[in-house]
Image: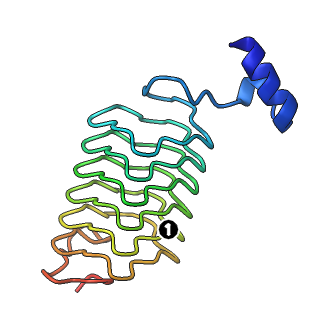
Amino acid sequence: MRFVLFIIALLTGVPAAFAADCTASAAPQVDWQRCYMDGRAFVGHDLGQARLRETSFQRSDLSGANLSKVDGYRVRFISAVLKGAKLDDGLFSDADFTKTDLTGASLVRADLRRARFFRAVLRGADLTGAKTLGADFLEADLSGAKWLDGTRICAEGSLGQCN
């Protein structure tokens, strides 16, 4: 394993101590930076405080997973399932949630600046205290979602904005 990390460090210029281990098991604080986890199932897994910068989870199932305090800058959850997942206090700026199912997910105090939620399903999601400056909710279903102030509930049929 040390040889592999050495080769990664040599080829990328990244010190071996900071090289991601894309073969590591799902666990809190795992370092999967720039890894491809497309189509995999992480249902109910605890990935709290994980380093997921620029990682791809396209078509993956993370239902009920704990993604609290994750560094998910530019992570891609395209067409993924995150039903009931906990993304509280996570960094998800510039993340792509296109067509992602976030039904009942908790995004309390999450940094969602410039994130894309094109056609995402956020029915019943909790966005209390989330930072959404520049986020794109085009055609996103926000029906029943708890909005940023923590008190307003989006009306049924709220598409692209909380009505």
Q: Residue furthest left?
A: 156
In front here: 27 or 78?
A: 78
Neighbor class of circle 1 (other Cα within 10 Å; few <14, some 14-19, many 20+) is many
The residue under the point 20% across, 67% down is 123
Q: Which amino acid does label 1 sit on?
A: Ala
Q: Which residue lies furthest to the front in this view?
A: 39
What is the quadrant of the C terminus in the image? bottom left
Q: Measured from the top left, where is residue 26 in percent x and y?
A: 43, 28
Q: Which residue carries the number 1 mark?
A: 115
Q: Determine the image quadrant of residue 142.
A: bottom left
> Could you say where residue 159 lies in the image, as x and y percent from the top left?
26, 83
Q: Is mark 1 on a helix, strand or loop?
A: loop
Rendered view: 162 above or below 111: below
Going by the image, does 20 lie left or right of 15? left
Q: In this view, does 29 lie to the left or right of 124?
A: right
> What residue is at 40 percent from the left and 75 percent from the top?
118
Residue 86 against residue 122 in the figure, above or below = above
Q: Which colour scheme is used?
A: rainbow
Q: In which quarter of the image is residue 79?
A: bottom left
Q: Position of residue 145 (x, y in %)?
A: 21, 69
